[in-house]
Amino acid sequence: MGALLEVRNLKYKTEEDKEILKGVNLDVKKGEIHVILGPNGAGKSTLANLIAGSGGYEKPSEGEIIFDGKNINGKPLHERARLGLTIAFQEPARFEGITVEEYLKLSARNNPSADIEACLRKVGLEPKEYLKRFLDDSLSGGERKRIELASIMCMKPKLAILDEIDSGIDFVSIDEIGNLFKTMREEGTTLLVITHRENLALIADRASLMCNGTIVETGDPERVIRKFEKECLICEVHNPELVKGLKQ
Ligand code: ADP
Ligand code: MG
């Protein structure tokens, strides 16, 4: 299978000239679940935003992003969305005054075959109970996260980037999230899943390890997890206190 997403030598500097990405290379194959594992501050969210064009990150300092054969570098978020690329974040969307049904219909606007009720059931929510609810604080964090995943299922993008959506989930287990990811993959969505949780990386077809602004390894998830455990958890850049303690 060919690459759906190719990131070539991607660099990103802040306005203060701080180098956040130092030449990232990454291939995501069509149809795979690809996990990016890495410690806090490695640059994972910066990379995710540059790929999706979200969060005000439209253009890298250097490098190329090829999605589905097209160079999408510098294209605005909505154009990338139209090409079939979507991103979800740790904190799910809140839209005051919009019902779950309206939100899911909006998500499904480019996918006429979407079955909104079926999408809700797949994430464990009974449509009768949820369609008329408002997407606000009356829903728990876990429910909003499930609805966000249902919205991606309704959208059926070619590529979904999920940035730490597993963080802060209390009552959606890792196993269940893994199964939801697999359902999405079966329905034709390629997944780029960003996490710092090793056990979530286990469900990946391939994994990449991101460290200090670059991808240092891509391949078999178990090997990547071992490298993460051996090298990142005791890395001086990301865990200086621990390393100082170990040296004493
Ligand atoms: P991760 O998602 O892997 O935790 P991030 O991509 O959020 O990492 O951040 C990587 C590093 O870049 C962090 O040290 C963060 O503080 C820094 N950073 C990100 N965006 C900016 C910015 N706009 N200005 C300054 N520093 C930034
Ligand atoms: Mg992050």
Image (cartoon, rainbow, N blue to C red):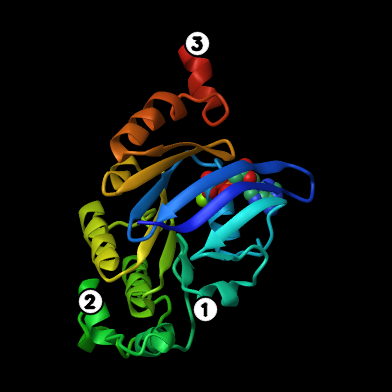
Amino acid under label 1? Arg
Secondary structure beneath dot 3 equals helix
Distance CA(mark 3)–CA(mark 2): 50 Å
Image point (46%, 14%), residue name: 246
Image point (78%, 44%), residue name: 17
Amino acid under label 3? Lys
Label 3: few (<14), some (14–19) or many (≥20) C-alpha neighbours in 10 Å: few
Secondary structure beneath dot 2 equals loop
Which residue is labeled 3 in the image?
247
Q: Is residue 42 visible?
A: yes
Up/down of 170 relative to 183, above or below: above
Which residue, as the protein is rendered here, is positioned at the far right? 16
State the image coordinates of residue 138 (x, y, percent, origin top left).
Answer: 37, 78
Nearer to us of marks 2 and 1 is 1
Q: Quadrant of residue 219?
A: top left
Of mark 1 and mark 3, the one earlier in the sequence is 1
State the image coordinates of residue 163 (x, y, percent, origin top left).
Answer: 46, 57
Which residue is labeled 1 in the image?
82
Question: For residue 102, which numbered disc appears in the image?
Answer: none
